[in-house]
């Protein structure tokens, strides 16, 4: 377990031996032994003057995990078709420890690129994917997500909270959620939930672009395509129409 503690500390930005030892509560000798073993197995890199960093073995395992996940296998072809049809960036995400975790991305064909990557983590309330992932939750649970991650002096107003809750009620009724610039002012997104055989939301799919290509009329039109793609992936995971509240 200590080896996992070392990896997590370095992932959080603790890169030198003294800081690692202090964080883990171990001696420098023990910490060096643990880190050296991880370097030898390629889980860590070490460079004099720069300290430790995550190694290539973790990247290899990440790709192996991503490609072996039933969700990824079920979704990939559908994501590619949606990206080809819309020309925009398509992303797949799951809810992990209360935040959106991006697990796949198909780049769009526009002259710009959406600044996101697999492995990114974002707050639920400010992303289309995040909103889609929590559509089945209660309003009390939605409230727990709203404004999370903002410093106290930048907390949204109560009026903004009520507006966001009203939007969430609409999204829940329609089975589709929008990002209306909460993350970046010029970014727009249409997202829909993906369900498993039990009807539970296990992931979400989104189409993202800038406002030039995402006027309200097009976002409404895209809602059908995104819901259709989410339903197709859900069906591949064993979901049947009428189980849960997915819309097709």
Image (cartoon, grey):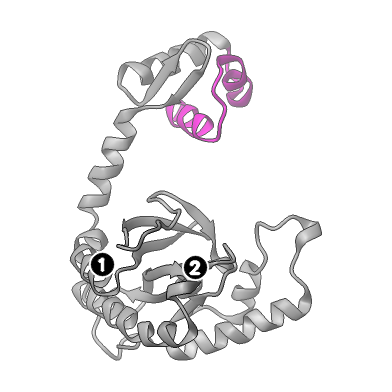
Front-most of residues 29 and 13: 13
Picture disc at residue 202: none
Coordinates of residue 100 in the picture (x, y in percent): 48, 60
Find numbered disc 2 in the image and state the secondary structure of the residue it sits on: helix
Does 122 sit above or below residue 147?
A: above
The residue at 35%/26% (across/down) is: 43
> Which quarter shows the N terminus?
top left
Quick one: quadrant of the C terminus? bottom left
Q: Residue 175: in sight, yes or no?
A: no
Q: Residue at x 40, y 58 (%)?
A: 112
Please report the residue visible at 19 percent of the width from the left and 73 percent of the height from the top.
Answer: 236
* Mark 2 surroundings within 10 Å by alpha-carbon count, few (fewer than 14), some (14 through 19), many (20 or more): many
Q: Give the answer, above or below, for where 6 lies relative to 93.
A: above
- Per the image, the residue denoted by label 2 is 130
Residue 207 makes an appearance in the image: yes
Residue 99 falls left or right of residue 112:
right
Q: Which residues are magenta?
A: 1-27
Q: Are marks 2 and 1 in contact (CB under 8 Å)?
A: no
Q: Position of residue 229 (x, y in %)?
A: 27, 77
Side of 140 relative to 173 (left or right): right
In percent of width and height, residue 200 lies at 37, 76
* Residue 55 picture location, percent across and down: 36, 27
Mark 1 nearby-residue class (10 Å; few <14, some 14–19, many ≥20): many
| Residue position marked by numbered label 1 in the rendering | 79
Query: Magenta segment: does it hold 8?
Result: yes
Mark 2 vs mark 1, foreground winner is 1
108 versus 143 height, above or below: above
How many angstroms separate mark 2 from mark 1 (CA)? 17 Å
Residue nearest the viewer, comparing 109 with 193: 109
Magenta region's main secondary structure?
helix
- Please, what secondary structure does the residue beneath circle 1 have? helix
> How many numbered marks are there?
2
């Amino acid at each position: 377990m200590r080896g996992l503690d070392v990896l997590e500390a370095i992932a959080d930005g603790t890169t030198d031996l003294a800081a690692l030892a202090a964080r883990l509560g171990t001696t420098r000798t023990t910490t060096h032994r643990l880190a050296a073993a991880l370097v030898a197995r390629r889980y860590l890199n070490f460079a004099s003057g720069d300290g430790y960093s995550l190694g290539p073995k973790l990247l290899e395992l990440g790709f192996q995990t991503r490609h072996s996940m039933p969700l990824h296998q079920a979704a990939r072809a559908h994501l590619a078709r949606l990206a080809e049809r819309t020309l925009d960036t398509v992303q797949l995400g799951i809810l992990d420890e209360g935040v959106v975790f991006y697990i796949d991305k198909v780049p769009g064909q526009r002259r710009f690129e959406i600044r996101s990557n697999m492995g990114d983590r974002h707050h639920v309330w400010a992303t289309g994917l995040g909103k889609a992932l929590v559509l089945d939750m209660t309003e009390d649970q939605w409230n727990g997500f709203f404004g999370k991650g903002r410093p106290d002096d930048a907390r949204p107003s109560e009026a903004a909270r009520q507006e966001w809750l009203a939007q969430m009620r609409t999204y829940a009724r329609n089975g589709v959620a929008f990002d209306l610039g909460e993350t970046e002012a010029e970014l727009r997104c249409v997202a829909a939930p993906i369900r498993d055989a039990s009807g539970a939301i296990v992931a979400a799919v989104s189409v993202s672009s800038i406002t030039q290509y995402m006027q309200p009329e097009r976002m409404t039109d895209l809602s059908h395509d995104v819901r259709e793609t989410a339903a197709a992936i859900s069906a591949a995971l064993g979901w049947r129409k009428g189980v849960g509240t997915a819309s097709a």
